[in-house]
């Protein structure tokens, strides 16, 4: 049996192309001044030999490992996983390797993972949060660019990407208004959450635009749970028996509210239109009827964050908090 053929080396490529090893290296890596004809011969030789550059050697030459770090704090993964998938898609398209670390919301574990990623000589980092609350910056002491996704950095000089929850909630209200709903309530999560504050602001803004009061007179803050949705249904119906629509701050709240409203003889959507938030399909498509909801486009957000990390590597960072649009997914709970 013939011995296995050894992989071609840069020396083989240079010999076949009739150039020095240094010239072949420059041509393949796009560095230095190499004549077009010489570059063509080098690439042709590399193709004939099925040459695959050694990743370690290339990293020593260019100063880049073509490896990115993804650091998440979302131990549940409900919001973090779509962001990570979008980022990984963009890295894959750029032929980047990805190292993923989960800090599980622990600051000490996060510092450990950062040290590990830097030891692996990653070219940059994307930090993914578990909520849209601002988080402490880690960029100041790091030698590589960092982009924050979902949870923005508290440093305005950093690059952060978050969903535009104000506009997302406003879209929900405008949809209900176009359907002729005029007594619209809002039930959401804890008031100290940035997401709850932003969604309440969007509902309030859109109601003011339409010249409508908020049903019940105020936002109902609670917790992100179906139990709170069931409890809130009782409060809403007692405060305003004529209420005809509810914008909920999450799909969990909406699912509980639909269940409780049905138990009290309210048909959804005929008597009461309900909008959720997050488009968490475990709930939004399985609730009866399926929920109209706001999708934060988290995979797009992750992909955009990765693209801007590429830009930062090239010295074209885009500081500030960038709010990306959400989209309304219309299902049977409103129409």
Image: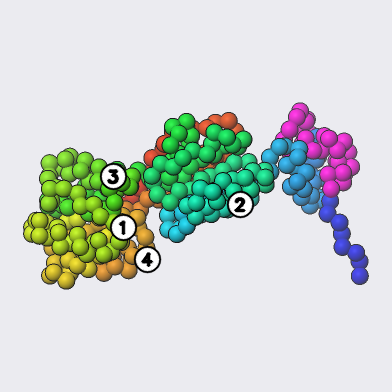
Q: Residue at x 32, y 68 (%)?
A: 286
Callout 1: helix, strand or loop?
loop
Identify the element where label 2 is drawn: strand
SS assignment at label 4: helix
**Distance between mark 2 and mark 1 Cα atoms:** 31 Å
Check residue 224 in the rendering and tell me which mark sits there, or answer none: 1
The image shows residue 271, relative to residue 178, as above or below, that is below
| Mark toward the start of the polypeptide (3 vs 2) | 2
In three-dimensional space, the C-alpha distance between marks 3 and 1, rounded to whole angstroms, equals 13 Å
Q: Quadrant of residue 242?
A: bottom left
Prevailing secondary structure class for the magenta stretch in the rendered image: helix
Residues at discs 4 and 2 in contact (Cβ within 8 Å): no
Kindly identify the residue that appears in the image at 53 percent across and 54 percent down: 102
- Assign a secondary structure to mark 3: helix
Where is residue 17, by image quadrant?
Answer: top right
For this rendering, which residue is in front, 270 or 169?
Answer: 169
**Upstream in the sequence, badge 3 or badge 1?**
3
- Is 24 situated left or right of 192 in this image? right
* Magenta-colored stretch includes residue 145: no
Q: Is residue 129 left or right of residue 205?
A: right
State the extent of the magenta-drawn residues as a range. Answer: 9-37
Instruction: Report the mark closest to the observer, 3 or 2.
Output: 3
Q: Position of residue 231 (x, y in %)?
A: 20, 63
Q: Which residue sits at x=12%, y=44%?
A: 212
Camera sees residue 187 = yes
Marks 4, 2: nearer the viewer: 2
The residue under label 3 is 197
Q: CA distance from mark 4 to mark 3?
A: 25 Å
Foreground mark, 4 or 1, reads 1
Residue topped by disc 2 = 99
The residue that mark 4 highlights is 282
């Amino acid at each position: 049996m013939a011995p296995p053929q050894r992989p071609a080396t840069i020396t083989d490529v240079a010999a076949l192309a009739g150039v020095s090893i240094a010239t072949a290296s420059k041509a393949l890596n796009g560095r230095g001044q190499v004549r077009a004809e010489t570059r063509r011969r080098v690439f042709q030789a590399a193709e004939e030999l099925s040459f695959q550059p050694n990743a370690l050697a290339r990293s020593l030459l260019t100063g880049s490992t073509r490896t990115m770090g993804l650091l998440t704090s979302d131990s549940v993964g409900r919001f973090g996983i779509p962001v990570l998938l979008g980022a990984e898609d963009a890295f894959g398209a750029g032929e980047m390797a990805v190292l993923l670390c989960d800090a599980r919301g622990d600051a000490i574990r996060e510092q450990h993972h950062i040290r590990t990623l830097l030891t692996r000589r990653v070219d940059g980092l994307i930090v993914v949060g578990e909520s849209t609350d601002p988080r402490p910056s880690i960029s100041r002491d790091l030698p590589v660019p960092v982009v924050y996704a979902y949870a923005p950095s508290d440093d305005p000089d950093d690059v952060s990407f978050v969903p535009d929850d104000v506009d997302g909630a406003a879209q929900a209200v405008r949809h209900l208004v176009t359907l002729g709903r005029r007594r619209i309530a809002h039930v959401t999560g804890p008031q100290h959450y940035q997401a709850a504050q932003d969604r309440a602001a969007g509902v309030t803004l859109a109601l003011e635009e339409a010249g409508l009061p908020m049903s019940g007179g105020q936002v109902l803050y609670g917790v992100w749970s179906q139990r709170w949705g069931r409890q809130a249904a009782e409060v809403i119906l007692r405060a305003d028996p004529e209420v005809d629509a509810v914008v909920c701050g999450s799909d969990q709240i909406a699912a509980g509210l639909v269940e409780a409203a049905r138990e009290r003889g309210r048909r959804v959507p005929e008597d009461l239109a309900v909008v959720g938030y997050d488009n968490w399909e475990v709930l939004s498509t399985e609730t009866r009827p399926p929920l109209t909801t706001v999708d934060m486009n988290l995979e797009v957000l992750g992909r955009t964050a990765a693209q801007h990390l590429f830009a930062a590597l090239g010295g074209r960072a885009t500081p500030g908090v960038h709010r990306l649009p959400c989209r309304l997914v219309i299902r049977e709970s409103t129409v």
